[in-house]
Amino acid sequence: MKKLVVIGAGMASGRVLEHLFEADPAAYDVTLFNAEPRGNYNRIMLSPVLSGEKSFEEIVTHDDDWYAQNNVTCRFGEAVTGIDRDRKVVIGANGEVEYDKLVIATGSAPFIIPVPGKDLPGVVAFRDLDDVDKMKEAAGGRGRAVVIGGGLLGLEAAAALRLQGMDVTVLHLMGHLMERQLDESAGFLLRRDLENRGIEVKCQASTAEILGTDKVEGVKLTDDTVIPADLVVMAVGIRPETTIAKAAGVEVGRGIQVDAQMLTSDPDILSVGECVEFNGQLFGLVAPLYDQAKVVAATLTEYKTEFVPKELSTKLKVTGCDLFSAGDFADGEGREDIVFRDPARGIYKRLVIEDNKVIGAVFYGDTADSNWFFGLIKDGTDISEMRETLIFGPGFQGGATADPMAAVAALPLDAEICGCNGVSKGQIVEAIQGGATDLAAIKAVTKASASCGTCTGLVEQVLGVTLGDDFVIPAAQSMCGCTDLTHEEVRRLIKSQELKSMAAVHQELGWKTSCGCHVCRPALNFYLLADWPVEYQDDPQSRFINERKHANIQKDGTYSVVPRMWGGMTTPDELRAIADAAEKYNVPTVHVTGGQRIDLLGVKGEDLPDIWADLNKAGMVSGHAYAKGLRTVKTCVGKDHCRFGTQDSTGLGIKLEKKLWGSWSPHKVKLAVSGCPRNCAEATCKDIGVVCVDSGYQIGVGGAAGMDVKETERLADVASEQEAIDLATAFMQLYRENAKYLDRPYKWIAKVGLDWVKERIVDDLDERRALIERFELSQSIYQKDPWAEHVAEIADTYKPLADFQLEAAE
Amino acid sequence: MSTVANDWVDVGSLDAIPQRGARVVKTPLGCVAVFRTHEDRVFALDNACPHKKGPLAEGIVHGNSVTCPLHNWVFDLETGQAQGADQGQVATYPARVDDGRIWLEASFLQLRAAE
């Protein structure tokens, strides 16, 4: 009888032996090595073992009896130390075994990220039963676990540890979970479901260090966040385990290279499983491994067949998280999307169509028909006939159209519709059922939309949803082509539904495009950072170039640079530094702006970080002359010099600018402080203008001197400087929280009314204080010099990716 | 910085361009904008809008389109065709991603260098 040696008792080699004994039980005398002290078991069921839903015995695929029946010599718990191909022997720790044919099935090894502390007790991978035992022991059903890696394996580990009663945090380097299998929308829903079951998820989290002395105590991220941990699970990825094959001189690329018969470069050695590379491809899911196993058994019994990789699909084995992905779901030339979103049920389905065939699919929340769609992908079925109703699945013909009111219909009854008067959807529905069947009646009965009016559209939609065809909603201007909702409705829903990411807005509000457009993205980015300063991560790619590069783009593609001059004050040193910078960077135009500062025009994009670094060195920071945010505080010289000055207008201007700078707002905001009613600083045409008088300060708001010219309206007269600063700050925050993106304050006040503003920040002292506190919280994150930050962190991105000009010259 | 392998030139790592962003590659005949979409596809186009030469690399990238930063013309990254009511076309060049690197076709760069 010929001798077969198999190295590695994994899922692939288990299948090989089954097929082999089926085809010809007498063909080989088999010896099976396994470094783990046990035989074949179903490795993909390790997560239920970890969670306690299954026992190890339940996932064993081949027990001692099976090996005995098939005369397999088991050498479990014995590592193979080498292969001598000349003598055709495998060298084990306890002695050599001869072979005629050898199957290498060494599988894969977990990738351990090379950070300090990776070897501490309590840091484990998630590959085999020993890892599971270590985790269970470390967990003891309590404590905190950090799982590094938000892919399939990491999330299964996280869910299992959570079921074991641990507090679990998942750290994921990419922007959304399972990015290889899911698009952003599905990734968002998955994240929400995991968070609902108490698992904390941090994306774009890069691990810097694992902390601890005798054992793991925490994980430190590159942004210096520290997460305490009693257990750290590394599940960032796997790599083929090829050490033995490589040492034996078998050809190895990323994996052990095999042909379609699963033969390696040595015709007597075959390989199977996660350790192989076929046509440049690696394999991590079980389906292709089983296909390979069939081919290995065939080759061993000299029956010629071929391994052909098939389309793959993925499902996550986490109870309650229903997701499915298959095929290719990237956008592409000639590809079209069919997207279905049902926010109420948390369902997202996306099909990618090319040449009338389904080539990719991502489903979340409802995967009942996934096999049918997977069949369409595998078979390349022509779907042109059923395209209209395709997304609804195999059982559906006749079709329904997407409902533009779905988002409002999906709101729970306790969701707040009118923020001013605290009116919920339920109260409005009750009023409608009580006979209030139009907007005016709702306003009268519930007060909803009776104050600032920005929720009018939503109230109308609640009327529409409740009354059906009996109510015709007046047409309103939608935000852009991506949605039917208006800016005001989107703002309101971001608050009431607590939407804290762009993907959340897109999914929950039924966005019609996959990632928005240049109109909605900057607006959403602002709304999210204004409403959720702590939770939301600013997205530079959703900002207009000026705010992304912190400089104003000019018509020739160069930029202008304007350093801040607090309250219009400067010094000889600052002026010298500006002059030096202008010369050093060949600035063609130096201009004094209307906001009392100096504009350097014509700076090349590549030079921006260098000129900023020079200006930073002289103590200057960005003037945000490019921002939808605080621009300038213009002042006159006040009572220090002017014979008419009544107060320290310059000092107040500087204090206001130091308080408000760095904040983002719906549109630009300009301030001025004049020292007397002669108003040399032109404070009465600013967004916020202060005119000093003997008795104190007159605060005006909503002025304009641009496309429209408008005098400020008086907000209040106050006696002290502190009150003036408080009112300006509270006004800024009220504007930030409520105005439509790209409405200057005067346009916003025209909509909500000055009285509404006064009620909140002049009359209601608690509200004023709360607004100031929220502003200060936001400033704790956003009040920083973006120039210094970009110089330190991303200066390289201002340079070209590559430069072929020089090469051509050489 | 760049190595010639077959007919493709490695111009940099995919990670060097943010998703929904772009970077510029300089050639003797002007800049080429290399875009990366939110689905990690890459496209190379002339970095000049046919309208007023706006630098497209600085535009907002959405889906497979980019909006020019100067006057909001929108271009399809696949075809270089202006969208909507605007009329115009930007030259496009072959680009691909392999093993985390971005590759442009060498013959195109040589062509631009030789002209």
Image (cartoon, grey):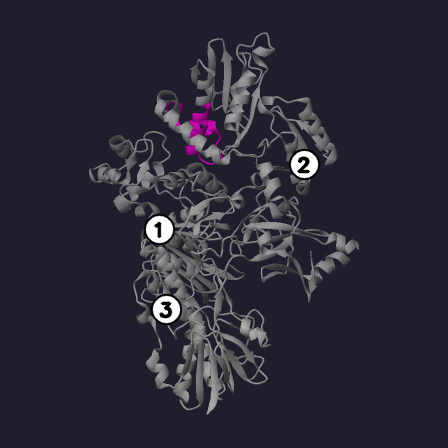
Which residue has dot 1 on it? A143
Instruction: Determine whether A13 is above or below A493 in the image.
Output: below
Q: Which of the two discs, 1 and 2, sits closer to the camera?
A: 1
Tell me the chain of label 3.
A
Q: Earlier in the sequence, mark 1 or mark 3?
A: 1
Q: Which of the two discs, 1 and 3, sits closer to the camera?
A: 1
* Residue nearest the viewer, comparing A517 with A365: A365
Q: Which of the two discs, 3 and 2, sits closer to the camera?
A: 2
Q: Magenta part of the protein: which range?
A: A727-755
Please tell me the numbered disc located at residue A611: 2
Q: Is residue A80 visible?
A: yes
Q: Amino acid at mark 2?
A: Ile
Q: Amino acid at mark 3?
A: Asn
| Distance Cα–Cα, label 1 vs label 2 | 50 Å
| Distance Cα–Cα, label 3 vs label 2 | 59 Å
Residue A182 shown in magenta: no
Q: State left or right for residue A798 relative to residue A148.
A: right
Residue at point 47% right, 78% down? A94
